[in-house]
Image (spheres, grey):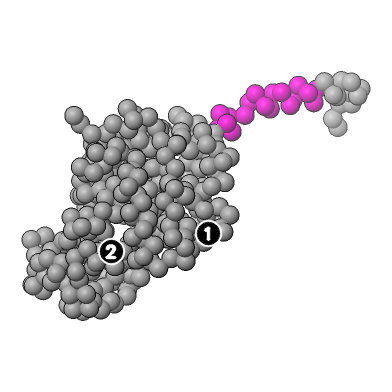
Amino acid sequence: MFPKYPPSRRTALLAAASIALLTALPLRAQETPVKFQLDWRFEGPSALFLVPAAKGYFKAEKLNVTIDAGNGSGGTVTRVASGTYDMGFADLAALMEFHANNPTAPNKPVAVMMVYNNTPAAVLALKKSGIKTPADLSGKKLGAPVFDAGRRAWPIFAKANGVNNVAWTAMDPPLRETMLVRGDIDAITGFSFTSLLNLEARGVKTEDIVVLPYSQHGVKLYGNVIIAGEDFLKKNPEAVKAFLRAFTRGVKDVIADPKAATAAVKDRDGIVNADLELRRLKLALDQTVLTPDAKAEGFGDVNAGRLALMASQVSDAFATKERVNANAVWNASFLPSVSDRAIFRK
């Protein structure tokens, strides 16, 4: 039997218990939860997000961040729009397409930080095919998953290089490089740092591979950005700013020591090949993050004219329902200061 106290005594005890419970709550209760989805599985480039998580940078900003793998930028954009995730990492072209095709969607994601200043999209072929330049692609058979960023943006690349009469074959991602090696297709599109290493894993020597990066052949598309849902931005603006601060701090660490950064990927997914993912991370940094364009525009930011041109190109290439509004897809007001984003060595 519990002891019986008079009403006044019970009230006092309840009040004291309530105060004790509140003061005993862990600091974790004061953190803002952030559900974040990557564009793809845990590979070298995901270290950009896994490192600040592993080092406690998000925690230091009072954020409780969970990071999940993705299965393509289109899916990440859709899941952030649905509210399943608060923020994500996705190709800017996929975000633009969603905006233009879903003008009345209530929670359209917004890009808040540029990460891949240059698209990693590229055409890859084997030297024995005779393909050396974009002009050699006319009349050839190309292959890629239907959602591949390079395939979606192909009309922009083709127009810039005068390529025509290309026949496309669709396949699941694991078959892309295999079909190229077997000779079923003449060339593929894909992220350069992914498809190059996948071809090597299938026994092709690096010197026998031709890589035609979109960014080096007249296509100045931006690549992947950090996105956030409109509702989350409105309700948690300081949390978004804090996320970007912690992320930028982590990026500096990744650049300073890519090998150590790869360990964070290995810790998250034990089956990955650490040496392979280190190479993939270095390729991603060199080709998309530490580029002359990124240095000129400032890491994390964009050039307004270039953004507007991309919006127009995506509208045409993707045949969107409405024209892409560049101002609607991009918001730089959450970015850390210019000095905090100084990732380039002088």
**Predominant SS along the magenta part:** helix
**Residue 122 horizontal/vertical position (percent):** 22, 61
**Which residue carries the number 2 mark?**
156
* Residue 198 versus residue 266 in the image, above or below: below
| Mark 1 lies on residue | 103
> Counting other residues with Cα less than 10 Å from the Cα at mark 2, is it few (<14), some (14-19), or many (20 or more)?
many
Q: CA distance from mark 2 to mark 1?
A: 23 Å
- Disc 2, SS: helix
Residue drawn at the location 26% of the way across and 42% of the way down: 294
**Residue 170 visible at all:** yes
Which quarter of the rendered picture does the C terminus lie within? top left
- Decide whether residue 65 is among the magenta residues: no
Residue type, mark 2 in image: Ile
Q: Is residue 190 above or below residue 36?
A: below
Please provide the residue range marked out in magenta. Answer: 13-30
Q: Secondary structure at mark 1?
A: loop
Residue 89 picture location, percent across and down? 40, 50
Q: How many marks?
A: 2
18 magenta-colored: yes
